[in-house]
Image: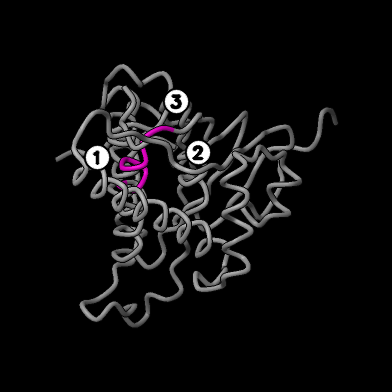
Amino acid sequence: MSIYEQPGKRIKLSECANNYYPDRYEKSIFVAGDNEIHFNTEVSGETITRLKKLISTIVDNSKEKLVKYDKEQKVPKGMEKYKDVMITYIVNSPGGSVHDILDFVDYISLLRDTYYNLKFTSIITGRVASAGTTMCIIADKRKMTRFASAMIHELSSGCGYTNFTKIVTYTEHCQDLHKKLVNIYQECRGIDINNEVETKKLEELLLKETWMNADQYMENGFVDEIIAKKLKN
């Protein structure tokens, strides 16, 4: 995961969402069905912006099914029985910018703070690394296909030729980012962020730049379910 960024009428998503936000990533970040998004590229400001736009369109089209929290962050009476609105994003990504993935994490959190019954499912397919794993772990339901691989590691960066004070300040910034990422991995796996033993285990996985198959990834608590197991009926 790098600190540097890598380069009114309702809309029916299944028909025109992929053309509604045309850009150079429309073939790698696209909608397949009304509530399913495929993300097959790196994490950058541009790709996260497109992903957020597509999710926003799904949310806008689902307003009649979504329940908003009231001002006290409580569910209005009689609304508890509304069914969940599930948005699924299928990810095959080498990772990318840490700042942009944290922007996505905050975006999903804002939606959760707004809508009681809005839920997310992530599916890892192909290979997902670095910031791509962060994207997936924040979902309510986390799945991984049988032959997929996933890799977590420490963030990487550099501050170039500069003075001592800037180096110190930048180091502190990197430490803060690292702590945020560790907390995300731990919280989403249901692990207390103050659990030093479990945090040390995670730190070791990050340090080793650990690649895991589906079974290993689930064993470590990063996904809940392995899917697409059949090769034939």
**Count of marks placed on residues:** 3
User: Sequence order check: which comes first, mark 2 or mark 3?
Assistant: 3
Q: Disc 3 vs disc 1: which is toward the camera?
A: 3
Name which residue type carries label 2.
Answer: Ser
User: Sequence order check: which comes first, mark 2 or mark 1?
Assistant: 1
Name which residue type carries label 3.
Answer: Thr
- Identify the residue at horizontal 33%, vertical 33% (top origin): 158
To which quarter of the image does residue 27 belong? Answer: top left
Measured in 3D between alpha carbons, the distance from the residue under mark 2 to the one under mark 3, in whole angstroms, is 12 Å
- Please, is residue 118 above or below residue 169 in the view? below
| Residue 123 lies within the magenta run | no
Where in the figure is residue 226, as x and y percent of width and height? 71, 46
User: Sequence order check: which comes first, mark 3 or mark 1?
Assistant: 1
Q: Which residues are magenta?
A: 96-103
Where in the figure is residue 130, as x and y percent of width and height? 50, 38
Q: Main secondary structure of the magenta part?
A: helix
In the picture, the quarter occupied by the N terminus is: top left
Residue identified by numbered label 1: 10
Name which residue type carries label 1.
Answer: Arg
SS for dot 3: loop
- Please, is residue 14 above or below residue 216 in the view? above
Where in the figure is residue 156, as x and y percent of width and height? 42, 37
Residue identified by numbered label 3: 41
Residue identified by numbered label 2: 130
| Residue 102 lies within the magenta run | yes
- Identify the residue at horizontal 47%, vertical 47% (top origin): 134
- Identify the residue at horizontal 63%, vertical 68% (top origin): 197
In contact (CB < 8 Å): disc 2 and disc 3: no
Measured in 3D between alpha carbons, the distance from the residue under mark 3 to the one under mark 1, in whole angstroms, is 28 Å
Viewer-side residue, 42 vs 151? 151
Q: Is residue 74 left or right of residue 91?
A: left
